[in-house]
Amino acid sequence: MANTTPCPQCSSYDVAKNGIINEKQRFKCKSCGYNFTVAKMGKSIDSYYVIKALQLYIEGVSYREIERLLGISHVSVMNWVKKYRIKIPKQEFYTPTYRILNHKELSEFVIVPGNLSNKGMIITELGDKFMVIQWTRIKSI
């Protein structure tokens, strides 16, 4: 029986099903006699969303907010933070706020001088919209 799965040993496509091991289909190569299982094809997330999620995390956006914004599980974001050893910088005197704007709203937002003065700001692409992250100084007591 011909298969679309090549043998990892000899690259032959002349393989046959040979039982199930740990709930995975096992194959045997008819050419070299090698037994193998096919690696599970997991769901992968585009690197664009991984980078955006980590950028938002560094900017101080919570895991749950990142989940709402990007549609990616907060657990996945936590795993990426652990995997890439991302540390949030201490922001004792600043607090981030963000807005999601389309192109027209963004151009109207940046025209107003009060929106740009005395604040730190990053504008980043978020799909077909834009995210404006601003930092305002917290008054110390």
Image (spheres, rainbow, N blue to C red):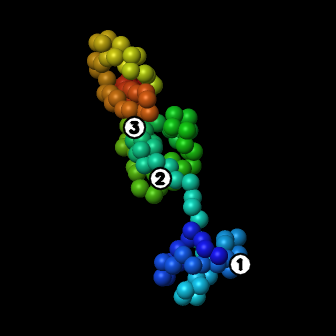
Image coordinates of residue 136 in percent, x first then y, are: 37, 25
- Tell me the amino acid under the disc marked 2: Trp
Which secondary structure lies at badge 2? Answer: helix
Give the residue displayed 33% in from the left and 30% down from the top. 122
> Which numbered mark, 1 or 3, is in the foreground of this view?
1
**Residue that mark 1 sits on:** 19
Between discs 1 and 3, the one toward the N terminus: 1
Q: Mark 2 vs mark 1: which is more N-terminal?
A: 1
Mark 1 residue element: strand
Q: Nearer the viewer, mark 3 or mark 2?
A: 2
Residue density around tag 1, few if under 14, some if 14–19, many if 20 or more, within 10 Å: few
User: Residue 123's x, y, as percent?
Assistant: 34, 29
Q: Quadrant of residue 139?
A: top left
Q: Is residue 112 left or right of residue 30?
A: left
| Mark 2 → mark 1, Cα distance in angstroms | 36 Å
Q: CA distance from mark 3 to mark 2?
A: 15 Å
Q: On the image, which quarter does residue 27 sit in? A: bottom right
10 Å crowding of disc 3: few (<14), some (14-19), many (20+) = many
User: Counting other residues with Cα less than 10 Å from the Cα at mark 2, is it few (<14), some (14-19), or many (20 or more)?
Assistant: some
Residue for badge 2:
80
Q: Amino acid at mark 3?
A: Glu
> How far across and down, in percent of the image, does residue 56 sit?
43, 39
Residue 138 in view: yes
Position of 123 with respect to 9 (left or right) is left
User: Height in image: 65 above or below 101?
Assistant: below
In what quadrant of the picture does the C terminus appear? top left
Q: Which numbered circle lies on residue 119?
A: none
Residue that label 3 marks: 59
